[in-house]
Image (spheres, rainbow, N blue to C red):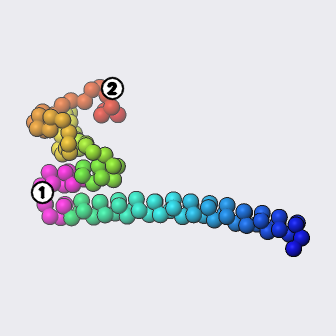
Amino acid sequence: MCPARISTDQQTLADLRCELAERTAERDGFKAERDEALAREAATAEVLGVINSSPGDLAPVFEAMLEMALTLCGATFGDLLTYGNELFHVSAEVHSENETAKRKNPFPAQPNGLLMR
């Protein structure tokens, strides 16, 4: 073969490898999106199952919602707050400080605080 042909073939091979790497990265991104969507669907199904199994009792529903949110976010602790009568109430918590005290003591929102936004 002539050297020009080898150079062209090598360039074509390099171009194909580059395109393959791009497509592989794109595929991996789509797989990650799919996996996240499947995790959200599974979490939703689990929460709906809790809702169906405990009609009228919101505590298990709030706990399941918080657990699923923490799992999806990769968080290790959190609170689920409800708002009523101008006070925030801790309705569920996972690995939070002063859990019992927070549940018993609803608190008002600060006028320009994060929770009022």
Task: Examine the rendered structure and indicate whether residue 28 appears above or below residue 114.
Answer: below
Where is residue 33 drawn, in percent x and y? 46, 60
Q: Amino acid at mark 1?
A: Gly
Q: Is residue 33 left or right of residue 50?
A: right
Task: Inspect the magenta stretch and tell me whether residue 99 lies in it.
Answer: no
Where is residue 95 drawn, in percent x and y? 20, 42
Label 1: element kind: loop
Residue at which label 1 appears:
56
Residue at position x 35%, y 34% from top?
117
Task: Inspect the magenta stretch and tell me whether residue 61 lies in it.
Answer: yes
Report, in whole angstroms, how far the alpha carbon at label 2 lies from the one at label 1: 34 Å
Q: Is residue 112 left or right of residue 26?
A: left
Residue at which label 2 appears:
112
Find the magenta span and give its range.
50-65
Label 1 CA crowd tier, 10 Å (few <14, some 14–19, many 20+): few
Kindly report the secondary structure that dominates the magenta region of the rendered protein: helix
Q: Nearer the viewer, residue 43 or 85?
A: 43
